[in-house]
Amino acid sequence: MKFLFFAILTLGGVLLFAPSCKKAYPTTDMSINSVIPRPDSVAATSGTFVLDDGTSIYVQSGNERLMKNAIFLAEMLRNATGFEIEINETNRKPREGNIFLTIVEEKENNPSNEFYELSITEKLVTIASSGEEGNFYGIQTLRQLLPSNIETEGIFEEPLLLPTGTIIDSPQYGYRGAMLDVARHFFDVESVKRVVDYLALYKMNVLHLHLTDDQGWRIEIESWPNLTSHGGSTEVGGGEGGYFSKEDYKEIVRYAEEHYIMIVPEVDMPGHTNAALASYPELNCDGKVTELYTGIKVGFSTLCTDKEVVYEFVDDVVREISEITPGRYFHIGGDESHSTKQDDYVYFVNRAREIVKSYGKQMIGWDEVAHADINSEDVVQFWAREKNASMGVKKGASIIMSPSKHAYMDMKYDSTTVLGLTWAGFTEVDDAYIWSPDTLIDDINSKDILGVEAPLWSETVEDLDDVEFLIFPRLPGYAEVAWTDPSKRSWDEYKERLGRHENRFKALGIDFYQSPLVPWQDEHDFFVEKE
Ligand code: TNX
């Protein structure tokens, strides 16, 4: 009798609990993904990987940067789920249910460090890459395959589901950037770090900081202290301005590096220099200081190009900034020098270029610098004049594509946009996306092109909310223009993927422009219910 009682109890237990041991999860479909930029290839296998409290990250032993990537991923998962997500080093493929980050031998046709293969089976998630940056990009893809609430703290108690399949991916261009003008309005270190976070999510790898302009000097130069104490003391509209101490700048560089983003510093010269001219009389031809300026006109200021002290000044500035800049580039500006005679301009750029080279950096300049004696060591940033860009290529320089008609994030979206300028035309989200670097200018081909950069000038942009409104949702489009082969891009397909980023923007707290051209949708159709 006792036995029968126990037998019934046991059987009941089995019947009751067995089904819940193997919970049926809805299948997910990797082919209906929302990954931006669009990867090279996606092969879905219509299964599900379950990421839960038992999931750990295994990192190929002895690679510090890979370990940092693992910490990035683990922290994101821990914050959103409360799961432990341990990190371990290993030399072989881990057990079921885990995530494996590893470096593979460079594949012959994928020589760059940016290649990665993300393979998700029901048993294991593997990111195998040619370099640490590729691995980081694989993590960003994984991140975008996870529900967007992963971006928010403490949302999930349930396991996270990942669609199975394989993504093989590498970028078209090696320079994928954005520019932030911290001179017209100043943005503090925290705001710059948020911009770095956004670039990293979309696999961009350059943040160009426009550090000086007529309205403000934003980087400490120890040998010329008035530049910041006086020249940094205001901004457009008369606000109090501000500047980065060297420690601040180093912190930005460090944070950016952790996200595989190179900082390109720009000191705009010989025009756009009123803040410097107001701080040191000797930089002016008449030896008198100018007034600080808080308007938004351009083209009225110039360093005195035939004074030797000006080149001592440039030397000190380039040296001090280069010392704390690990990246290979130094941007000398060179745009809109309407108050500098053409010969003086060419003379100045040639000398500034030599100074940049003497500190081991490569010069970048806005497209006007093509008039100077440049060659294959230099980079021309196309923004306005196709002729300048073509001249640069003829002299052997490479080109960064920042066409103002498509890539200027400070242009208004349409006539109702409150923020922004209009001189290059309205730039709706489709205008920002529908162009290709290699077909934009007749005699410039992909081999001449270093990459793509989208500038955000800040005459009308006062705080991080303003930045977010103008860069989202255009920024992911620039990331895709720079990353994805043009033959694999179409606006009609892209806008659907972009629409599925709505919840991610919201989860990140991004104040974005809800363009009527984008079919905004929540992501639930990403999960396909099992029949
Ligand atoms: C042109 S783009 C400029 C900037 C302005 C911008 C406003 C370039 C090299 N120069 O000085 O801020 O237009 O859109």
Image (tube, rainbow, N blue to C red):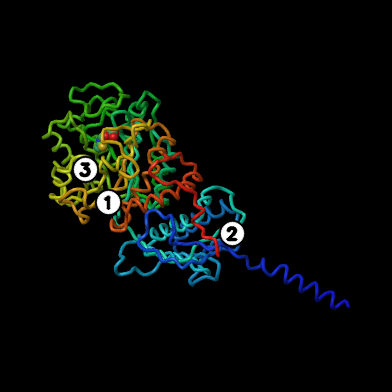
Question: In front: 529, or 114?
Answer: 529
Question: In front: 395, or 320?
Answer: 395
Amino acid found under the numbered disc labelled 1: Gly
> In which quarter of the view is residue 348 placed?
top left
Q: Position of residue 243 (x, y in %)?
A: 38, 33
Amino acid found under the numbered disc labelled 3: Ile
Q: Is residue 322 above or below residue 34?
A: above
Amino acid found under the numbered disc labelled 2: Pro
* Residue ID for mark 3: 355
Residue 499 shown left or right of residue 294 in the figure: right
* Residue ID for mark 1: 451
Q: In terms of sequence position, does the residue under pointer 2 or pointer 1 come before the other?
A: 2
Specify few, some or many for label 3: CA neighbours under 10 Å numbering under 14, 14-19, or 20 or more: many
Q: Which mark is residue 107?
A: none
Q: Is residue 58 above or below residue 496?
A: below
Q: In terms of sequence position, does the residue under pointer 2 or pointer 3 come before the other?
A: 2
* Residue ID for mark 2: 159
Q: Position of residue 26 (x, y in %)?
A: 56, 62
Distance from label 2 to label 1 (Cα)?
39 Å
Residue 143 shown left or right of residue 320 in the figure: right
- Quadrant housing the C terminus: bottom right
